[in-house]
Amino acid sequence: MTDILMIAPMHPVCMEEIARLGTVHRLWAAEDRAAFLREVGPKVEIVATDGHWGCPPALMAELPALKLISSYGVGYDNINVPAANARSVRVTNTPDVLNDAMAEITVGLMIALARRIPEAEAYTRRGDWAAKGNFPLTAELTGATAGIVGLGRIGKEIARRLVAMKMEVVYHGRSEQPGQPYRYFASLTEMAKAVDWLVVITPGGPETRRLVNAEVLAALGPEGRLVNVSRGAVVDEAALVEALRSGALGGAALDVFEDEPRPHPDLLTMPNTVLSPHQGSATVRTRAAMGQLVVDNIKAHLAGKPLLTEVTG
């Protein structure tokens, strides 16, 4: 039987089906991690993990027989793919199957922030509608301009939905993409000056750490709104808090944070924020599809077939 190291608890699809494919060693359940890895590390051929835990270089070094890292999630910034490939270790993730769910929550966060839905609901529940009268007027998405930071698979799905909602879409990325109907900005700061909404869906990692900084937030301005559904570290959270507190930024809708599951405490009390606990792909349908793709990549590896969604450095 093939030895498989599972880093942390996973979706039931993964837990059940992977158990049928080999001998599963549960790293999170080990009382003595070092002793556990000394015993099973030399035998492990496959690592099953997710985008949060990844497979750190120190762990990879303890797995000399490793051939495959199959990760649950589209992000792989916690896996050093070039280092893995240099050891002939192949890496897979779960793209595409979560695009629609990610696009849906992005639009949902935008509507919730623009129409102040959490505040309006609380206003209704408290009885303020009857006691104080109608809730104040709000903003809307129609006619506004959204700048997408990272026009990848998910970014394109978001763009399609925003266009359908009568918004103008522009984008920023490392380079202009031929054939796209949206205006390209080489400078993120210049794009922030030109838009009403900044939608962040770029990959995480060192290259994009705090890409959205105080300068970008200032350019977005007091009427601007930020949406982050990528990685918390892409936005300078301290700078974001200060911009929201001072009125330099109009609002923020966030599904990700720098120190999950602990958002900056000031964000929790700000009325011009909508906060979600990293729920982007967390639907029953999408998470099951992600889990199945993890399993299918492992099956392909064991059968000597091409991997379905290989990541190359």
Image (spheres, helix red, strand yellow):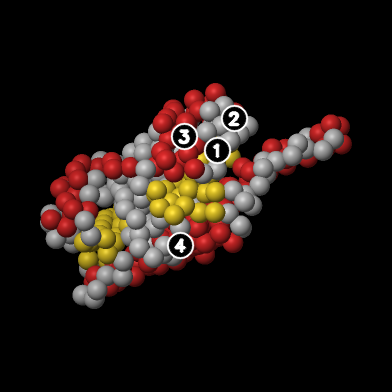
Q: Is residue 284 above or below residue 275?
A: below
Between discs 4 and 1, the one toward the N terminus: 4
Mark 3 residue element: helix
Q: Which of the marked residues, 3 or 4, is nearer the chain's N terminus?
A: 4
Find the distance from the CA under tag 4 to the CA under tag 1: 23 Å
Q: Amino acid at mark 4?
A: Pro
Q: CA distance from mark 3 to mark 4?
A: 24 Å
Give the labeled residue for mark 1: 224
Label pair 4/1, CB-CB below 8 angstroms: no
State how far apart marks 2 and 3 are (Cα).
21 Å
Name the residue beneath numbered marker 2.
Answer: 270
Task: For marks 2 and 1, give the CA distance.
Answer: 16 Å
Q: Nearer the viewer, mark 2 or mark 1?
A: 1
> Could you tell which of marks 2 and 3 lies nearer the N-terminus?
3
The one nearer the camera, 75 or 52, is 75
Q: Residue at x 26, y 60 (%)?
A: 311
Q: Residues within 10 Å of mark 2 (few under 14, many from 20)?
A: some
The x, y position of residue 288, in whole percent, is 47, 64
Nearer-the-camera pick, 274 or 251: 251
Q: Which residue is mark 4?
A: 181
Q: Residue at x 55, y 43 (%)?
A: 196
Q: Nearer the viewer, mark 2 or mark 4?
A: 4
State the image coordinates of residue 250 (x, y, percent, origin top left): 58, 34
SS label for mark 2: loop
Residue 219's tag is 3
- Give the position of the N terminus as an image quadrant: bottom left
Mark 4 falls on what kind of element? Answer: loop
Secondary element at image label 1: loop
